[in-house]
Image (cartoon, grey):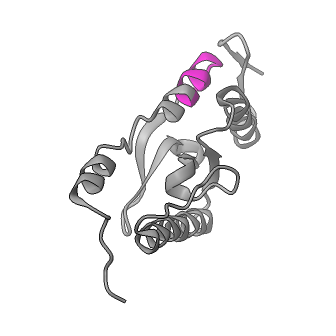
Amino acid sequence: MPRLEPTSSDTSRRMGKVRQKGTDAEMALRREMHRIGLRYRIDYEVLRKPRRVADVAFPGRKIAVFVDGCFWHGCPEHATWPKRNAEFWRQKIEANRRRDMDTNDRLRSIGWTVLRFWSHDSPAEAAKAVARVVAEVDPKHRASSSGANEKN
């Protein structure tokens, strides 16, 4: 299948400026996790070949957290399919979805817990979900809503 290109150099340049790391949704989740007492690594390489980087990771606990953008990862609620150069964008988004599933499968096969959130998800609710998983993996760690860690 021939490689499709973006519609124009303007589109390509504009899309190239879209942040891949430190997006608003990631930053909101990270702030909320920090507020409730979770400490984590950011942009952590969880796989070398193929190279995959988690937005947030708890390496010692083998927990990887990804915050997926609605457009780039094809959110079932909010994704839109561009009409211009539709085949290029469909291939791009579908490739992202396949890579996400492959990443999930590879990480789970080596004992990682994978958490994925959409960029539209509530940062507070997502942080609580992460805290629950951290507590399940490491019962001594409890994040509190006040931001202080409680140890049992």
In the picture, measured across the screen, residue 140 lies left or right of residue 12, that is: right
105 or 27: nearer the viewer: 27
- Chief SS of the magenta region: helix
Where's residue 89, x and y in %? 44, 66
Residue 80: within the magenta? no
What residue is shown at x 55% (from left), y 26% (from top)?
Answer: 28
In the picture, measured across the screen, residue 7 lies left or right of residue 141, that is: left
113 or 82: nearer the viewer: 82
What residue is shown at x 41% (from left), y 45% (from top)?
Answer: 44
Which quadrant: the C terminus?
A: top right
Q: Quadrant of residue 60?
A: top right
Q: Quadrant of residue 110?
A: bottom right
What residue is shown at x 51% (from left), y 44% (from top)?
Answer: 59
In the picture, measured across the screen, residue 33 lies left or right of residue 99, that is: right
Magenta-drawn segment: 29-39
Where's residue 19, x and y in %? 36, 41
Q: Quadrant of residue 1?
A: bottom left
Mark count: 0
Where's residue 34, x and y in %? 56, 21
In the image, is residue 115 above or below residue 131?
A: below
